[in-house]
């Protein structure tokens, strides 16, 4: 089969779970299939035309670049909605030749960022099946994570709501710079930082007096622009033949916003996640771990509050190790919370084997959570919020470790501190079950999915 994957970029220039997943899937599929990678080209210096350019090889994967792309928003919101679907001149002959000459049968899209809808529409018209993996909520939510300006989950998308939420996001110029090859080179050098994210404000209000957030005004023109962007993405999603939902939760969220979305739930995995399960040996101090960003939507503040309350209430037989890209330090509010510096992936097993339990307390609808799968793959129990897509996997082991409120989380951790052998029983369950996850099996599942209607 001849397969084209579109992703924002490849490691090491681009990082993140979705990038690593797409990269590992492509390389695995290239063992027996002809695989092509199309990546978002440079955004700093825009060309006159959008076309596909050959960019070399990565193993057996043939790599191409899309020139004159739209501007990826990365982890930011959208302050200039019209720029996210600006008109560009597309070289359709170039794209037709690329698709036809390489006999592409499937286009597997891992993000809409940078990729013009009209290109996908044209490729579909050539008889190519369009598949989309739901790594995040970009396209449904201009802020990608369905967390509104108040830090709450958002269950609606319209021009008013989105204009309010994205009012103070970085400019398109900022995004073009941080997506550029030049910026990546400077960042990699470590010499200096040329940009930092403008500090977000969360106080805005719509002219409708019923929405009293503060003194900023959302104009009718802005509302119309966000409605147009949302409509653009709805048309985009209508081009997708098969949605690859990475969890049942993600499927539910997508179908709430896009009722026509149809596809299959297949948990994701990367090549580094393998069966490395080991016995858990408990000591007097229970070591919990948090791995990821401390941004509000990841729920770290919930976990920290719970741990501090437990410490203040006399529970001192624990440590919380926080791996969040920070330098080594002790939390000034709770001496049992330790911040650890970043680790290389080659050290991942050392990190997990020195933890007794991993906590994933996400506030947003986390589409999956590779950290959860990584922990289970090392035999480590995991506590997850019911907003984590990987709860599907945790439920197969111990449903009681899925929480829906801070009080639930506090009760689970209190039970562990009072009866640590509960973790031992969880570890025994992990070890007793067959480990069904591997990039090889996953690749086969995805190939079979491509053949479905």
Image (tube, helix red, strand yellow):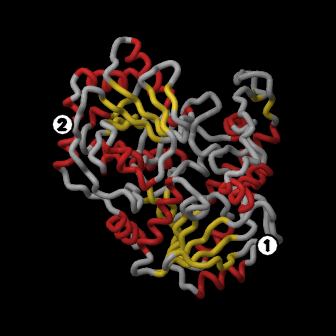
Relative to residue 35, is residue 218 drawn left or right?
A: right
Q: CA distance from mark 2 to mark 1?
A: 60 Å
Q: Is residue 45 above or below residue 136?
A: below
User: What kind of element bears circle 1?
Assistant: loop
Q: Is residue 421 left or right of residue 229?
A: left
- Mark sitting on residue 49: 1
Res. 240 in view: yes
Q: Which badge, 2 or 1, comes first in the chain's sequence?
A: 1
Between residue 132 and residue 56, name the one nearer to us: 56
Name the residue nearer the viewer: 79 or 194. Answer: 194
Mark 2, residue position:
425
Label pair 2/1, CB-CB below 8 angstroms: no
Question: Where is the N terminus found, in terms of image quarters?
Answer: bottom left
Circle on res. 62: none
Q: How packed is label 2: few (under 14 Cα within 10 Å), some, or many (20 or more)?
A: some
Query: How far across and how far down the image is residue 324, in percent?
Result: 51, 39
Q: Nearer the viewer, residue 55 or 340?
A: 340
Location of residue 221 in the rendering, given as x and y in whole percent from the top left corner:
82, 41
Rendered residue at 56%/48% (across/down):
137
The answer to whether residue 396 is left or right of residue 221 is left
Residue 408 locus on image (x, y percent): 35, 24
Q: Is residue 225 visible?
A: no
Element type at marker 2? helix
Q: Nearer the viewer, residue 177 or 229?
A: 177
């Amino acid at each position: 089969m001849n397969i084209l994957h579109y992703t924002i970029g490849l490691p090491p220039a681009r990082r993140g779970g979705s990038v690593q997943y797409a990269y590992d899937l492509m390389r695995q599929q290239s063992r027996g299939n002809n695989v092509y990678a199309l990546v978002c080209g440079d955004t700093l210096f825009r060309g006159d035309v959008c076309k596909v350019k050959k960019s070399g090889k990565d193993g057996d994967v043939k790599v191409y670049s899309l020139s004159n792309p739209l501007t990826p928003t990365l982890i930011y919101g959208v302050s200039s909605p019209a720029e996210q679907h600006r008109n560009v001149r597309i070289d359709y002959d170039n794209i037709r030749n690329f698709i036809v000459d390489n006999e592409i049968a499937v286009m597997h899209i891992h993000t809409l960022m940078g990729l013009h809808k009209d290109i996908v529409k044209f490729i579909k018209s050539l008889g190519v099946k369009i598949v989309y993996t739901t790594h995040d909520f970009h396209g449904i939510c201009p802020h990608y994570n369905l967390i509104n300006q108040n830090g709450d989950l958002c269950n609606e998308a319209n021009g008013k709501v989105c204009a309010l939420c994205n009012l103070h996001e970085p400019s398109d110029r900022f995004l073009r710079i941080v997506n550029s090859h030049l910026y990546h080179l400077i960042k990699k050098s470590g010499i200096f930082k040329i940009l930092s994210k403008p500090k977000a404000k969360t106080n805005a209000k719509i002219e409708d007096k019923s929405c009293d957030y503060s003194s900023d005004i959302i104009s009718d023109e802005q509302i119309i622009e966000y409605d147009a962007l949302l409509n653009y993405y709805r048309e985009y999603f209508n081009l997708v033949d098969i949605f690859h939902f990475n969890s049942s939760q993600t499927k539910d969220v997508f179908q709430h916003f896009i009722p026509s979305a149809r596809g299959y739930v297949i948990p994701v995995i990367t090549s580094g996640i393998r069966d490395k399960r080991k016995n858990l040996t408990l000591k007097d101090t229970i070591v919990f771990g948090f791995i990821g960003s401390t941004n509000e939507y990841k729920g770290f503040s919930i976990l920290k509050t719970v741990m501090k309350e437990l410490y203040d209430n006399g529970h001192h037989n624990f440590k919380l190790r926080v791996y969040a890209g920070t330098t080594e330090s002790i939390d000034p509010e709770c001496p049992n919370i330790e911040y650890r510096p970043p680790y290389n992936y080659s050290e991942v097993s050392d990190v997990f084997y020195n933890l007794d339990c991993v906590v994933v307390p996400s506030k947003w609808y986390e589409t999956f959570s590779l950290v959860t799968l990584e922990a289970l793959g090392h035999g480590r129990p995991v506590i997850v919020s019911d907003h984590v897509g990987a709860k599907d996997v945790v439920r197969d082991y111990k449903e009681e470790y899925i929480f829906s409120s801070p009080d639930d989380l506090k009760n689970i951790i209190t039970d562990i501190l009072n009866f640590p052998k509960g973790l031992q029983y969880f570890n025994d369950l992990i070890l007793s079950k067959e480990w069904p996850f591997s990039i090889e099996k996953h690749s086969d599942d995805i190939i079979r999915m491509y053949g479905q209607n």
